[in-house]
Image (cartoon, rainbow, N blue to C red):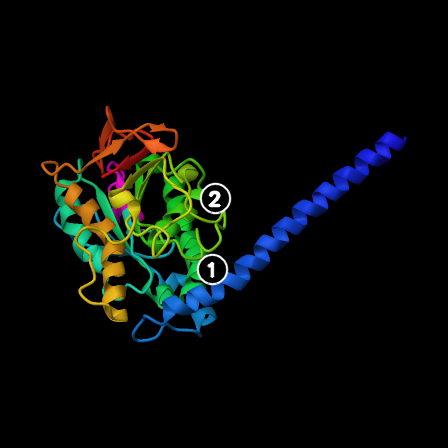
Amino acid sequence: MAKLVAFLVVLLCGNLAAAASADLISVLEQLSEGPLARLLDLNIDPPPRTTGFSTLLPQKSIRLTCTKTREPRFQEILYGDVNLQRKLNFSLPLTIAIHGWQERNLSTYSALTMPYLRFARNNTNYCLLDWRAYSEFGYQIAARQSVPLVAQYLFGFLQNLSLLYFPLESVTLIGFSMGGQIAGLTGKLLPGRIGTIYALDPAGPLFSHPVDIGPKRRLDASDAQYVQVIYTSRYTAGFGKVLAGAQNFLPNKGYHPQQPCTAKGDGLSDLAGALQCSHRYAVSLFVSSLDPNNPIIGKKCPTIFGARVCLMPTRDRLGIYAQRIRGDFYL
């Protein structure tokens, strides 16, 4: 009996310690993320929204426009759209692009759309997810409230597709920055069913740093059958602590400044512009890689005593032509 009591005491103490550890992490997360988010908000002009989140309706504030031809003829797909099978070709794969935080001019879509439609291996359905109404809030609101809400909306659309017998393994999500985190959370709601995620320098602040919130709440390699991540501003605007993809590409080891993004001066605006350049460099690389005649090659090198040794590296292409070899590839 005494042994049983002792065992129960040890078990209880262990559970209390685990709970205390979880509470401590939660407290640290709350204490650290507020100042970091406010710092990020300072660089936004005009300033981010801070009120009005609850007055928005996802069905009206999130727009999904799609084309099923190489010559774009975009049509809006409404929430619960009864004409879905006329607006999409169910015999073709489906790609959905997801923009980032505070992207008012949708520059990611301007860069991506025509090259993707031109060079995609097969004719494809191609959609643009417009969540600007939710991305215009301050960083903390966007990361903690907008991202899961938009992911839930996208999940509802894809779940409806699957009920109409569209194969979700034919779905590709391409997300830049916070859009990469939306892609990951959408994949978690359909565990193991989405075919592919390309995360282009997925957002790091409040996801991987200052505290890693864990794979259940941010992008992870298990969010699709294949997850490729391109890192170009680790530990700053981009994801930091862990490499979250099944296949990871790291130009300049993933760190800012990237090769074309050196600050022209030492002013705050110069430094911020250079960081934004590095953050968006992931988009540039992905778009450039769409041309089959422009291979961007990464090298996977074994690690010996903590150092990478690239005598006989494994090579693979960044982007949609990758052989999908798991691991970390350096450019």
Quarter of image, res 288:
top left
Q: Which residues are magenta?
A: 83-95
Q: Residue furthest top?
A: 312
Quarter of image, res 30:
bottom right
Q: How many marks?
A: 2
In this rendering, position of residue 166 left or right of residue 121: right
Tell me how far mark 2 sits from mark 1, CA to CA.
Answer: 15 Å
**In the image, what residue occupies the spot 67% across and 49% down?**
19
Nearest to the observer: residue 191 or residue 293: 293
Give coordinates of residue 94: x percent, y percent. Answer: 27, 42
Quadrant of the frame with the N terminus: top right
The three-letter code of the residue at mark 1 reads Arg
Nearest to the observer: residue 206 or residue 110: 206
Give coordinates of residue 158: x percent, y percent. Answer: 38, 45
Residue 31, visible in the rendered structure: yes
Q: Under tag 1, what secondary structure?
A: helix
Q: Under tag 2, what secondary structure?
A: loop
- Per the rendering, the mark at residue 144 is 1
Q: Residue furthest left?
A: 293
The three-letter code of the residue at mark 2 reads Pro
Quadrant of the frame with the C terminus: top left
In this rendering, position of residue 106 left or right of residue 23: left
In this rendering, position of residue 40 left or right of residue 109: right
Q: Residues within 10 Å of mark 1 (few under 14, many from 20)?
A: few
Give coordinates of residue 286: x percent, y percent. Answer: 21, 45
Instruction: Tell which circle, 2 or 1, labels the residue nearer the N-terminal end.
Output: 1
Does the segment drawn in magenta span residue 15?
A: no
**In the image, what residue occupies the spot 26% across and 50% down?**
127
**In the image, what residue occupies the spot 49% across and 53% down?**
211
Nearest to the observer: residue 207 or residue 272: 272
Circle 2 sits on which residue?
A: 215
Residue 174, visible in the rendered structure: no
